[in-house]
Image (cartoon, rainbow, N blue to C red):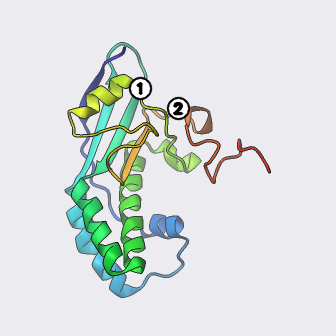
Amino acid sequence: MPKYAIEEIKVQPEFDIFMYAELTGETRLDQDLMDEFAPRWDDWVTKLSAFQLTNTEGDNGYVLLFLDSDVDEEIDHIWNDSPAYGLAFHNLAVCMVMTAARSIIPEMMEGACAPLPRAPQGVKDATAKLGIEWKEDNTINRKFAVFTPFPYNGGCPVCTLSETCPNSTARTQQ
């Protein structure tokens, strides 16, 4: 079984209002909401982790980005107080990890996709040291995360979501 070396990647994503609007389908953002975004973004950037995972026996590798679990909890509390704000902050967290991923892998912008490969056991073992637990459905114990091949090597052919992805052209037509 291949082993994976982990190297931390420093990321400092800037809020991209256009990406947020594209992600949410919004054409307007309320100023009060925007005023709430700024301090949260600044705080959450400090809770964003990014790692390059390199196969020590080959050339395939991955990038894993995630927000700390306390961001998950904060957004859960916001959902409980206001579902509308909860959705907005959920989308802000998604925007953050995707903006950070795009800063590491600019090719993602071309396909508008971060393909989700099945994590090999070596990756699961290596990321356990980071407190990451992989589930049977290939998800981790963080709500806001990106796991994708690095260097970028395409979309649907390597993605475990190709049948269910809304951007998929490989889906069976009904």
Q: Nearer the viewer, mark 1 or mark 2?
A: 1
Residue 17 image point, x, y percent: 43, 70
Crowd class of label 2 (few under 14; some 14 to 19; many from 20; radius 10 Å): some
Query: According to the image, label 2 marks what residue?
Result: 153
Residue nearest the observer in this picture, 143 or 25: 143
State the count of labels: 2
Q: Quadrant of residue 14?
A: bottom left
Disc 2 secondary structure class = loop
Q: Are marks 1 and 2 in contact (CB under 8 Å)?
A: no
Crowd class of label 1 (few under 14; some 14 to 19; many from 20; radius 10 Å): few
**Quadrant of the drawing holding the N terminus:** top left
Residue 36 image point, x, y percent: 29, 79
Extreme residue toward the front, this view: 136
Residue nearest the observer in this picture, 100 or 162: 162
* Side (left or right) of 77 relative to 31: left
Q: Which residue type does callout 2 highlight?
A: Asn
Query: According to the image, label 1 marks what residue?
Result: 120
Q: Is residue 66 above or below residue 52?
A: below
Residue 44 image point, x, y percent: 24, 61
Q: Quadrant of residue 13?
A: bottom left
Residue nearest the observer in this picture, 140 or 10: 140
Residue 92 image point, x, y percent: 38, 66
Which residue corresponds to the image point at 57% horizontal and 42% vertical from the top-left?
A: 161
Q: Is residue 57 above or below residue 23?
A: above
* Side (left or right) of 104 relative to 51: right
Q: Quadrant of residue 136?
A: top left
Q: CA distance from mark 1 to mark 2?
A: 16 Å
Which residue corresponds to the image point at 55% horizontal and 37% vertical from the top-left?
A: 160
* Side (left or right) of 138 relative to 170: left
